[in-house]
Image (tube, rainbow, N blue to C red):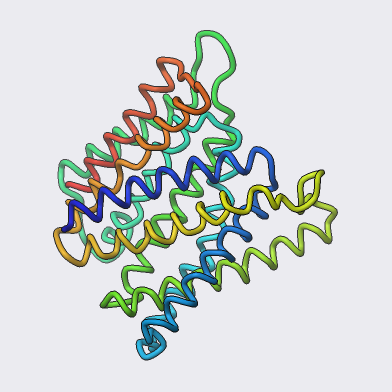
Amino acid sequence: MTAFFALATSLLWGLADFGGGLLTRRNPALTVVVVSQTIAAAVLGAIVVATGGWTEAGPRLWFAFAAGLVGPVAMLSFYKALAMGPMGVVSPLATLSVAVPVGVGLFLGERPGLMQVAGIAVAVGGVVLAGGPQLKGAPVQRRTIWLTLVAAAGFGTVFALIAEASTDVTGLFLALFVQRVTNVAAGGAALWASARRGGAVLPEGGFPWGALPALGFVGLADVAANGTYAVAAQHGPVTVAAVLASLYPVVTALAARGFLSERLRTIQAAGAGLALVGTLLLATG
């Protein structure tokens, strides 16, 4: 069961990442985040009502609230990075989010093992290589790398918080609902502030009604991935769940290759691969 749900997480996250990055190339990133999360929140609200999830309300929901505040920052940074591309570099670098639990453990007095130290070194090396240097042509923009690292830190924080927000499936639905409502509120406030400063809220053609199904898919796939990951971690070793779930960049890269004919330079592919290997070492160390 752990393997099934963890692999489902990889598939859902990978497709959500690809769809979100693609939509952000034609629409403001903040709008993509707010609309997709609003759709997800509406669906989750219906599920909570149908399952009686309100009975699970308690102090643990503060973790979900905190995750909801961090989530929009991470998603906005990630979608912007995906839009700047290439997806085959951005998505593997985002798997460095697993370093957050390691950092929390260090703060609490834990000491990393040899494999974790190796994972950190390999992952940092991957970050450097993924951004260049290039013998010819333009390297990945430095801003893209920084946005991806911000997203990774945010995702890692969200995963740690949402894991503490519930103890069963019914409570998980409520926690995810609270998280998404907070996402929408925080993202909506940021969108309003951006509009006040003259920032773009909608594409030139107006609200992208034609993209609404795609926006809904991105939001629902993202929230479903959070749910399947939590279930995987609750039913088996977290290390197994983390390793299998961290394979989602492969899905994103394959989608980018298949639909966008995206190609990576050798040094970029090597850096992205090292970052992924480093992530796996961190998860299994």
Residue drawn at (83%, 61%), measured in percent from left and top? 196
Q: With respect to residue 61, does 147 lie above or below? A: above
- Write down the quadrant of residue 111 in the picture: bottom left
Coordinates of residue 123 in the picture (x, y in percent) = 33, 36
Residue drawn at (29%, 33%), measured in percent from left and top? 122
Coordinates of residue 217 in the picture (x, y in percent) = 50, 53
Q: With respect to residue 177, does 145 lie above or below? A: above
Q: Which of these two is toward me, 209 or 285?
A: 209
Coordinates of residue 80 in the picture (x, y in percent) = 60, 43
Q: Which of these two is toward me, 285 or 25?
A: 25
Residue drawn at (42%, 80%), measured in percent from left and top? 48
Residue drawn at (44%, 83%), measured in percent from left and top? 49
- Write down the quadrant of residue 93 in the picture: top left
Q: Is residue 81 left or right of residue 249?
A: right
Coordinates of residue 72 in the picture (x, y in percent) = 56, 59
Residue that sits furthest to the bottom in the current view: 55
Q: In this view, does 53 lie to the left or right of 201?
A: left
Q: Which of these two is toward me, 230 or 60?
A: 230
